[in-house]
Amino acid sequence: MPCSRTRGHASGLCRPAQGSGEARTCSRTKRFRLEDCQRAESSTPIRAIGGVLLCASVLLSGCLSDSFEIKQPLADSHVGITLAPEVLLEVDDTAVKWGSGKVGEALSTVLVKNHTFRLAHYPIYPTHKVPLKIKVIAKGDIASEKGLGFVKAFVTGLLFFIPSGVIQYEDTFSIIGSVSVIRDTQSYGPLTVEASVAANHILFSSPESYARQASALALEDFANRVSLALNRHPEWFSP
């Protein structure tokens, strides 16, 4: 009997100890689950934002297209009087980084289209004598946007390039030319003519596609400005 009471007493003492251990285990389990829930809840907004940006990037990257804007576009139609029947074009465009070799062709096309001259010889000259020559020395460059461009790049990198298909970047294609008129031994000018076109594109778009369109647009605008500048000096072409 004493032994029985001792065993009973001992087992009675053990039960509370086991209960306390289970309580501590349960408490720790609840705490861990609570912390996991809190971590999951805190990460949910981040995941949601990332998901939204990813979806927007995928959807809008197919919708966004390159866009172009002529800086300070001309107001008139550029069509003026015919200054002379024909003219020779002498063009130095080696300093035009994005359109070398194309300035003369653009000029000859636009000068005839605008009726500034009936013929603009370039690059092949006729065998007969042409008393008028237009001499053009041009240089051009490409400039990427500063300030805001840095902010865009920072945000794109911060969000692990998720918005790279949504944020647009701007490159400006600019050209400046010195235009002189030579009639026999007399020289007139030079006139300074400038043109620039902004090309907006997404980060990973092929530069060939938007550069080709931007350069063509800049050259056409430059040629129109040369045509307009020459029409302001008809006295240079009088016999």
Image: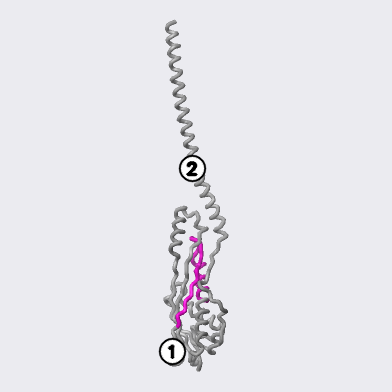
In the picture provided, is 2 more to the left or to the right than 66?
left
As displayed, is residue 120 above or below residue 40? below
Question: CA gap, disc 1 to disc 2?
Answer: 76 Å
Quadrant the N terminus occupies: top left
Query: Which sits earlier in the primary sequence, circle 1 or circle 2?
Result: 2
Q: Which residues are magenta?
A: 191-220
Near mark 2 (Cα within 10 A), the count class, few <14, some 14-19 or many ≥20, is few
Taking the spot 45% from the left edge, 66% from the top edge, the residue there is 144
The percent coordinates of residue 204 (x first, y second) are 49, 60
Q: Which label belongs to residue 187? A: 1
Taking the spot 57% from the left edge, 56% from the top edge, the residue there is 59
In terms of secondary structure, where does tag 2 sit? helix
Residue identified by numbered label 2: 42
Is 213 part of what is drawn in magenta?
yes
Q: Which label belongs to residue 74? A: none
Residue situated in front as seen by the camera: 93 or 153 = 153
As displayed, is residue 196 above or below residue 203? below
In terms of secondary structure, where does tag 1 sit? strand
The percent coordinates of residue 110 (x first, y second) are 54, 80
The percent coordinates of residue 154 (x first, y second) are 44, 57
Colouring used for the render: one colour
Instruction: Please count the marks in the image.
Output: 2
Residue situated in front as seen by the camera: 170 or 206 = 170
Residue type indicated by callout 2: Ser
